[in-house]
Amino acid sequence: MDALAKILQRNSKSFDTRRTTYLAMKITIHNRFADTLNMEGRRGEKLSFGKYKVCTTIIDCVKELYPQSTLLEIENHISDWLKQAPRR
């Protein structure tokens, strides 16, 4: 995961936490796979993205780039990105 963290820090930095989180998600997760995920894994047959190590890696990378951002804020951005997967 260290290699992924370095790649994300280098390639997903943008002007705010939302855009940075979206870029990190785009780099790591394909839209077809994202369509089967949500943050909690509660609805229907979707899997919980929050329990995967890649989720923690994305959160840590965004937090390192934007230390003022909160965990809840980053998780909400991830959740929003996952919700939009069927339309992409």
Image: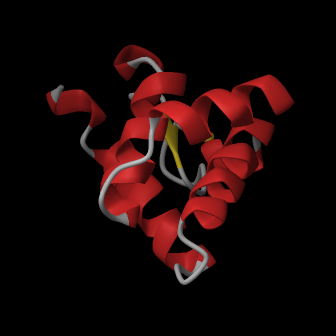
Q: Is residue 55 above or below residue 85?
A: below
Q: Nearer the viewer, residue 47 or 30?
A: 30
Q: Is residue 66 above or below residue 83?
A: below
Horizontal relation, residue 35 to residue 37: left or right: left
Q: Nearer the viewer, residue 12 or 51?
A: 12
Q: Residue at x 48, y 38 (%)?
A: 24
Q: Residue at x 52, y 79 (%)?
A: 69
Horizontal relation, residue 24 to residue 42: left or right: left
Asked which quadrant contains residue 59, the reply is bottom right
- Percent position (x, y) of residue 4? 71, 27
In what quadrant of the picture does the N terminus appear? top right
Numbered-mark total: 0
Give the colouring mode of the picture: secondary structure
In what quadrant of the picture does the C terminus appear? top left
State the residue lying farthest toward the front: 10
- Percent position (x, y) of residue 21? 44, 51
- Percent position (x, y) of residue 57? 73, 45
Q: Is residue 72 visible?
A: yes
Asked which quadrant contains residue 39, the reply is bottom right
Q: Residue at x 40, y 29 (%)?
A: 26
Q: Is residue 43 above or below residue 7?
A: below
- Percent position (x, y) of residue 44? 49, 42
Q: Is residue 1 visible?
A: no
Q: Nearer the viewer, residue 7 or 74?
A: 7
Horizontal relation, residue 36 to residue 2: left or right: left
Asked which quadrant contains residue 84, the reply is top left
